[in-house]
Amino acid sequence: MLATQRTVCLAVRAYQKIEELRQLLEIAYSNYKQLGGITVEERKKKKEEREAEKMIRELEAQLEYERVRREKLERQLDEYRAETSHLKECLEKLQLTPTISGVSVCPQEGEAASDLGKEKKKMKKKPPGSPGGVFVRRY
């Protein structure tokens, strides 16, 4: 019985010593922080904050890229819709009124066709100074 009382008393004294040391450790941490020291927890927290900020910047950049891409596609879609409506109008005009002596009702189509013809003619011409002809071997 005396041994059990003694063990209980030793356990209580050990617990009190643990609490005293814990308080001293907290005071030491506080002093360290006041002197400008950075604890391990603070380092981890700052590292996580930097990683989070980096992720936010990357996501914002990706969002901006997608926004610009969407605007570009919307602009292209609007252009295609305008072209489609214009071509429908021209088609309706062609169906209602026949062409007059080969003149197109839709002026833009005529311009496009004449441009294509000019481009083909330009493509057929050889640049000046380029050698032309066939080499003949003489014996």
Image: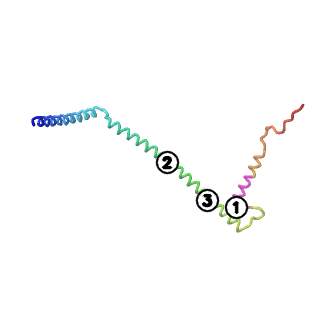
Q: CA distance from mark 2 to mark 1?
A: 40 Å
Residue that protrudes farthest toward the bottom in the picture: 96
**Residue 77 or 45: which is nearer the viewer?**
45
| Count of numbered badges drawn on the protein | 3
Q: Residue at x 77, y 62 (%)?
A: 102
Q: Which residues are magenta?
A: 104-116
**Label whose residue precedes the other's in the sequence (3 or 1):** 3
Residue 121 on image: x %, y %? 77, 49
Toward which corner of the image does residue 97 lie, by quadrant? bottom right
Q: Which residue is mark 2?
A: 64
Give how far across and how far down residue 96 sits, in percent.
Answer: 70, 68
Q: Position of residue 20 (x, y in %)?
A: 18, 35
Q: Is residue 67 left or right of residue 50?
A: right
Residue at the far left in the pictured view? 2
Q: Which is in the foreground here, disc 2 or disc 1?
A: 2
Left or right side of 88 for 18: left
Return the residue at label 1: 106
Residue type at the position of mark 2: Glu
Question: From the viewer's perspective, is the residue at label 3 or at label 2 nearer?
Answer: 2
Q: Amino acid at mark 1?
A: Cys
Quadrant in which the C terminus appears: top right
User: Quick one: label 3 or label 2, which is nearer the N terminus?
Assistant: 2
Residue at which label 3 appears = 82
Q: Are marks 3 and 2 in contact (CB under 8 Å)?
A: no
Residue 74: quarter of image:
bottom right
Mark 3 and mark 1: Cα distance apart in space: 15 Å
